[in-house]
Amino acid sequence: MSVELNRIDDRLIHGQVVLGWGQPMALARIAVVDDTIAASPWEQDLYRMAVPPEIEVAFLAVDDAVRAYASWQADARPAIVLTGTVDAMCRLAEGAPALRAVNLGGVHQGPGRVERLRYLFLTPAEERALLALEARGVAVTAQDVPTAAPVPLRELLAGRGAA
Amino acid sequence: MSERPPAIVLGHGSLAFGLVDAVERITGRGRRLHAISNEGLGGAELAARIREAMAETGATVLFTDLPAGSCSTAAVRAVHGIPGALCVMGANLPALLHFAMHDELEPADAAREAAARGGAAIKLYPDPARER
């Protein structure tokens, strides 16, 4: 499997992704799945600044990512797929059944959000969406960096995942 | 010296506060810098926090700790489209000290000099040039 990580992270491309996760897996590709950024060349340039030249970066709307996902899986090069929201990842997973695991890497403070971990704040609607994703057989865990222990979704929603 | 800080320092964790504290201890001019942490903030929230601080202080210069990181991404978002605003990414203590000491310059000019000063301040010992 060449998609090594499907990550929800509202900071998208940043140090944890490029260094923390990327270096140990010899990351070759980052796919940013975001409808807004896919239509915004200057924002794409902004995120490219954070990526070493040897790593390929692609920016796709969710619908385009659904069509591309199988080819990323078939590619031998390690890839990370990033979304900035729970909603975008759920839409991607719905259209791409090969997506079998989701990493909650960073969803920060916002209106209606409740702290589940120091890097994870979720609204009730987001929690329901993640539980529905898991019910469809997708493994959902929270883990900001590879050296941290992954926290299963049900454990963190039960308040047992405090980091 | 103006009481309103002409620059904002953004960093991971408590780094920005530590850098500003160091500038204050070395020069007594820490008030020229306003520190913000990215702790607990997503990209959009951090950019909003920066814009709020720019509006409150009038600051037009942003220093960030790491060129490839959430602070820089949010900082560039915050200055995008604002005439005269400038972002210095990967700033270190020598850069901030230079900026703090040059209130006779326009903030953007002082920031450009500070960027050059900060880059040049990184040294090796033993000096490879002297070892040849």
Image (spheres, rainbow, N blue to C red):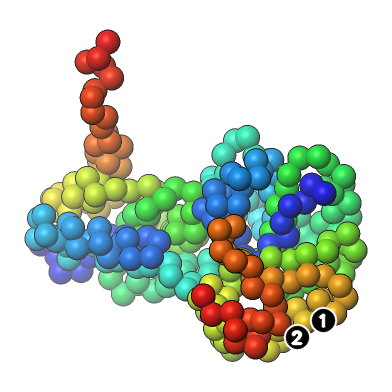
Which residue is disc 1 drawn over?
A132
Q: Position of residue A93 (x, y in %)?
A: 83, 67
Q: Secondary structure at mark 1?
A: helix
Q: Residues within 10 Å of mark 1 (few under 14, many from 20)?
A: few
Pick the residue in front: B16 or A25. Answer: A25
Toward the top, the furthest residue is B132
Q: Say the numbered circle drawn on residue A128.
A: 2
Give amino acid for label 1. Answer: Ala
Pick the residue in front: A121 or A53. Answer: A121
Q: Position of residue A159 (x, y in %)?
A: 60, 87
Give the position of the C terminus of chain B as an image quadrant: top left
Same subunit: marks 1 and 2 = yes
Question: What chain is tagged by disc 2?
Answer: A
Give the position of the N terminus of chain B as an image quadrant: bottom left
Q: Describe residue A155's horizontal placement relative to residue B10 as left or right.
A: right
**Residue A121 falls in image quadrant:** bottom right
Pick the residue in front: B23 or B132. Answer: B132
Say if residue B80 shows up in the picture.
no
Q: Describe residue A107's horizontal placement relative to residue B3 as left or right.
A: right
Q: Is residue A93 above or below residue A153?
A: above
Q: Describe residue B74's horizontal placement relative to residue A137 as left or right.
A: left
Residue beneath the point at 24% across and 49% down: B93
Residue beneath the point at 73% across and 60% down: A6
Say if residue B27 shows up in the picture.
yes
Q: Residues within 10 Å of mark 2 (few under 14, many from 20)?
A: few
Q: Position of residue B126 (x, y in %)?
A: 23, 24
Q: Position of residue A88 (x, y in %)?
A: 75, 69
Q: Secondary structure at mark 2?
A: helix
Residue beneath the point at 24% across and 23% down: B127
Give amino acid for label 2. Answer: Arg
**Residue A82 falls in image quadrant:** bottom right
